[in-house]
Amino acid sequence: MVSIRGSSRWSSVYRFARSRPLRTLALLSAAAAFVAASAAVVFYSGALLFGTESPLARTCPSDAAQFRPLPALDPPTAASGLSWGDYDNDGWDDLFVATAPSRLYANRSGRLINQTVAAGLPENLNAPSAVFADYDNDGRLDLLAVAADDTGTGHRLRLRVFRNAGNGTFGETTAALGLASGAVESDTGALALADFDSDGRLDIAAAFSGRLVRYRPPAGVSPSGRLQRERSYGPGAMRILCGRDQLEAAFGEDPDLAAAMEREFGTTSRFIERKGCLLVLLPLPPGLFSPLTRKVQIIALLPGEVRILRNAGTAFDVAYAMAPAGETYPLGDHRAASGLKPWPFVSGRFFQPVAFDANGDQRSDLFVATDFGRNLLLVNDGAFSFRDASAEYGFAIYGSGMGVALGDPSRDGVLDLLITNGGNLYHFRRTAGGFQLDHNESLNHLGLGWGIAFLDAENDGWSDLAIANSVDLLAYPDRGANLLHPTSFYHAAFSKDRFYANRRGAFRDETDRTVCTGTSPTYPLAVADFNNDGYEDYAVGGPEGLTLFENVGGDSHFLKVRLRGRRSNAFGVGATITVVAADGSQQTQLVAIGESFHSQHSLTKTFGLGSSAEPVTVRVAWPSGVTQRLNDATVDRVVEITEPDS
C-alpha cells in the first residue's frame, strides 16, 4: 500500500508532546486497549488465528479492489484531523489536514495542491482538529480550528476562526468574534456545528477531552491496597476512584503515585479540585490469551468539558457548558457495569461531538462520544437549555466511545448511530422511544476503533462502513509482558483498518477485498468524492502519514445533492436529504459538520442508485422546518437545491 508518510515530522510532534496537545493521538487508546481488547483476544482468538478475520489469512488483490491508495501529497504530512470542504466554491472539495503544522490542500480538478501560505493561513498552526463552516452566512466556507494556545503553558487549547475573504484567502477573526480567551486544559478537542436556536446561524459545539496521564508502579513495587481492592465502581478489570476522600486516601497510601501526579498537575490538591479521577487497570490471570499486560496500570483523568457557543452574528458567547462533577459512585455496582441498568459515570473524556435531531422535535441535539464510561446525549429543549438524556434515550451503557457515524444502513428512512470503541462497535438503532443497542451485531471486534463513516463504495444504494483502527504502541513497551507489542501478531489485528460491505442491510467484512488496508495507526477518517466521478473516496490519517483512497468507480448510477439555504443556514447544515428511487426504495443522509473522529465529510451528498437510470424524487427536510420536494430529478449529475423563502 502506498502511504503519504511523515514519520520524522510526527516523531518531532511526539518529542514536544509533553507540552502540546497532539501527544494524545499516540496515547489515548491505552486503557481502551487493555479493558476491551482483553475480552476480544479471549473470545475471538479462534477467528484471529484461523478464520477470515486473520490479517495474515488474506492477500490484497489490488487490481480488483474497489479503492486504491494514491501517491503522496506534496509535502507529505501526518494527520490528526481531516476535513473536506469546497472553500473556493469551484465545485471540487478541498482538504484541510489538522496536524503540527496544519495544511490546506486546494483541489484543482482532482489534484490536491498545498495552498496553506497562499491562502493566508498560519504556517505553524498546531491543531488537533478543524472544520469548514460558513459562520457568517455569506455563502463561503470559513475555517474553525481547535488549536494549541501558544500564549500559555502546554496542554491548553482554544478556538481559532479564519474567515473566508472570497478571493482564495482567509483572515483570522478569532479576537473580533470574542474567542481570544477561554482556553481549556485538554489534550485534544473536536467540533460540531449546527443551528441550535433555529435563528439561521450556525452555533459551535466544542468537546474537550481533558488530560490523560498514565502511571505504572515502579518495577518490584506493588500499588497500595486501596488501589487493588474492589473499593469503587467499574467493570471487570477496572476500578474508578473519584472524590476527595478516595483520592486523598489513595495518594496517602501510595507516595510514588502522589509524586507522579504532582509532576503532571502541580499538586495532588489541584488534581482533586479539578474533579480528577483515577482509573485502575488490574492485571488478568496469566495465560496465553488473557494478559495484554501483567502489570497494574493507573490512568489519571482530568475531565474535559462540552461547550456550546451561541452565534450572535457578530460574536460568539458560551451559552451552555457541561463538565463532570467528579463525585463518588456506588461501590461494586456490577449490574450497571454489565449493562443491566444505566451506567451513571461520565468520565469527561469527551471526544467527537455530532449534532442531529434525536427526537424529531426539529431542534438539533448533541451527542458526544465519550471514553472510559458512558456516552453523552444532550437534548435541546430550546433557548440553549440542554439536559443529559443519555439514560432516557438508551445511551447510558459503558463503553470507550471514540468516533461517531450517522446513517441509514437499513434504508428505513431513519438515522442509526454507530460508535467506535476499544473493541466491538456499538450500533444504536432508532426506536419509537429512543435508541436500542443491537446486541446481535458484531463489527470491528478485532479493532480499536477511531474514525468511522458510511459511504456507498459500489453505488448500489446500500451504505457501507469504513473504520480507522489504532493501538497505542507506546503504552505496551514490554514485548514479553503483553500481546499488543508492535512485534506481536496480535498488534496487526487490532491496528488494521476495516471495511464492511452492506449486503442488503447486513454488514460483511470485505477488508482487503474492497480496500487494502495496512496496520499503521490511523485516527481520522473523512469521505468526499474528491475527483467528481460520482463515487465516494475517503482519507485516513495518523502519526505515520495520510492515505487517500480513490474509488475506482463502476457502471452504477448516482445523484449528488448540494443544498443552499435561505431561511436556514447557507449550506443547509442539519437538513436531511431523502432520495426515493423509481422502485420505491429510499436512502436518507444528514448534512452535518463534525463526524467520525476529528473529521468532516463533504457537504455534497452522494446517493448510489445501482443499475437504475430512472429519475428519482428528492425530499429535503430543512432546519427551518420547511419540507421541500423535487420530482423527476435526472441522475448521474449534481443537483443544487435552494430552500424556498417560505
Image (cartoon, rainbow, N blue to C red):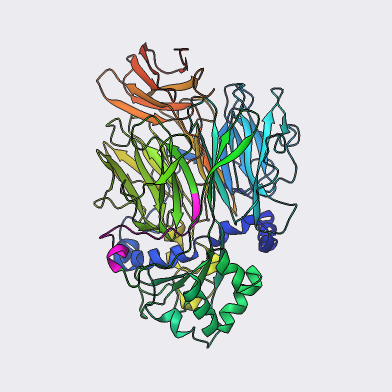
Is residue 515 visible in the rendered image? The answer is no
**Can you give x and y, in whole percent of width and height, for residue 64 in the image?**
41, 39
**Left or right of residue 118: residue 204:** left
Is residue 538 visible in the rendered image? The answer is yes
The chief SS type of the magenta part is loop
Q: Is residue 347 magenta?
A: yes
Residue at figure coordinates x 53%, y 66% from the top left: 276
Residue at figure coordinates x 49%, y 65% from the top left: 30
Residue at figure coordinates x 44%, y 72% from the top left: 281
Residue 306 or residue 29, whichever sits in front: 306
**Left or right of residue 255: residue 228:** left
Q: Which residues are magenta?
A: 334-351
**Can you give x and y, in whole percent of width and height, for residue 239 in the image?**
41, 72
The relative height of residue 452 versus residue 348 in the rendered view (above or below) is above
Residue at figure coordinates x 45%, y 65% from the top left: 327
The relative height of residue 223 versus residue 42 in the rendered view (above or below) is below
Q: Quadrant of the C terminus?
A: top left
